[in-house]
Amino acid sequence: MTPQRERARVGERDVVVIGGGIGGLATSALLAREGHRVTLLEKRDQIGGRAGSWEQDGFRFDTGPSWYLMPEVIDHFFKLMGTSAAEQLDLRKLDPGYRVVFEEGFDTVDVPADREAVTKLFESMEAGAGEQLSKYLDSAEDAYEIAKKRFLYSTFQSFLPFFRPDVLKRLPRIGSLLLQPLQSFVEKRFKDPRIQQILGYPAVFLGSSPFDAPSMYHLMSHLDLDDGVLYPMGGFTTLIAAMQRVATAAGVDIRTGADVVSIDTRERTPGRSPLDRRSATVRAVTYRAAGTTTTVDADIVVSAADLHHTETTLLPADLRTYPEKYWEKRVPGPSALLLYLGVRGSLPQLEHHTLLFTTDWRDNFGRIFGKETSVPSPASLYVCRPSATDDSVAPEGHENVFVLVPIPADVTIGRGGLERGGDARVEDLADAVIGQISEWAGVPDLAERIVVRRSYGPQDFADDLNAWRGTSLGPAHILKQSAFFRGSNRSAKVDNLFYAGSSTVPGIGIPMCLISAELIVKRLRGDTSTGPLAEPATG
């Protein structure tokens, strides 16, 4: 079949963004706001990527992210688009922020929504822990503020951020925080294993283990224990809908069901610097949709798809900045077993957010991230019950339950399915997890009350999201894969090819993906500043 071809209109600079997740949506919106003509291509029939939505029998499930953290970063994106999070979303603060259920020997702990109450809680768990927590959170806030001011919003085109006075005076401390694992950092300050787990678990949000993540990431505790946890009423699908609204209003042409097959290039004209290794420049993007192959001309291409997929599938071998040999040395974040459960009756035993922690913490993470991996059993896991806050996500008299179990990034574990229709290993794991929640949380008839059941495994992440090794998040945030050690957001081989999303700087999570979009704007402006762009963005 002869491919169709769409040509740019004379005098316009055309941008094609690949991938309609958080990073791609934000990038397309900001670049359209900058005055570019933007086409967004999404492989699946709905946008959102990992932050998708699924409905069945009156239940509406968020398929991925469910913690609304770093609200100022999300609000900043909307302000760059001429609006605000308050105008676009109905945000509620959760109190308690979350519940923690321990394997044995300890009572369940509800973590409250403000710092003073958390301090009292920790003091009740360990004498002197309240004062230690105050110091810990002061340190976390300072680390967060310097990261936000000098590193998170940096493209690392320049190393000048490292020579700013506020960074120089902190260099010894920053060095210590980068070289010491988070678990060790916490253990030196708190003896109670429950507190250690509460402060260490946020490493999982970064696709890592508290035994591997640098203690710089203790800054994560500032986000949930100082700032608190919010929830957008209607679920995270309302965030995606709001981003789609502002992107469309800015002029973005969003095309779903558009499976990109290649980033097309042409030889770059002579005259470049001998230090510049880029031998080609982008020319177009080719995609398939409904049996038709279409090529869209492009002056600029931004791939917010998985970086491994972009580099090893969409580009020829000689134009890959990150070929397979690069990925052989990288560490993936965990994959996940996801469960979407519609449950008859109420579940007061679960909070909106509930964490189940195993006693043998080191073994749990060792199985996920060690050289010889296996699925932990029992596993530390996370349960979200948004129907505790939001009546719109489940039919009356029912509960909406989302379960995430971190497991090794191993596609051989298999695919999930609807009503036990997944691979046998995935469904067996799902049965075990449902049994664990039932026993630990005190819901003995949980399995019998499930009226909707869908599972999702590592192979699904690979199939649906082109995720490297089936990871649920992206490359892990260990030291050698953080900040300027992470994948660059610009190709070293192809001019005008850029990268956004969780595979590149600054990293994993909704706020980081939003910042990655802003870094593309900075690249195109030639802006090497280290802080957020001024609000509102100017077109």
Image (tube, helix red, strand yellow):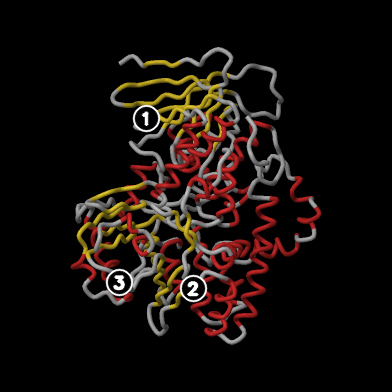
Q: CA distance from mark 2 to mark 3?
A: 22 Å
Sequence-first disc among 1 and 3: 1
Q: Residues within 10 Å of mark 2 (few under 14, many from 20)?
A: many
Q: Nearer the viewer, residue 539 or 2?
A: 539
Instruction: Tell me if mark 1 has few (under 14), some (14-19) or many (20+) residues whose alpha carbon lies within 10 angstroms of its own.
Output: many
Q: Residue at x 66, y 45 (%)?
A: 532
Q: Quadrant of residue 138?
A: bottom right
Q: Earlier in the sequence, mark 2 or mark 1?
A: 2
Q: Return the residue at label 1.
A: 258
- Residue 10, image x and y in percent? 55, 12
Residue positioned 55% across, 49% down in the render = 74
Q: Quadrant of the N terminus?
A: top left
With respect to residue 13, does 385 lie above or below?
Answer: below
Mark 2: which secondary structure?
strand
Residue shown at the point (64%, 39%) measured from the top left: 536
Crowd class of label 3 (few under 14; some 14 to 19; many from 20; radius 10 Å): some
Q: Which residue is mark 2?
A: 111
The three-letter code of the residue at mark 1 reads: Ala
Three-letter amino acid code of the residue under disc 2: Val
Mark 3 — residue? 436
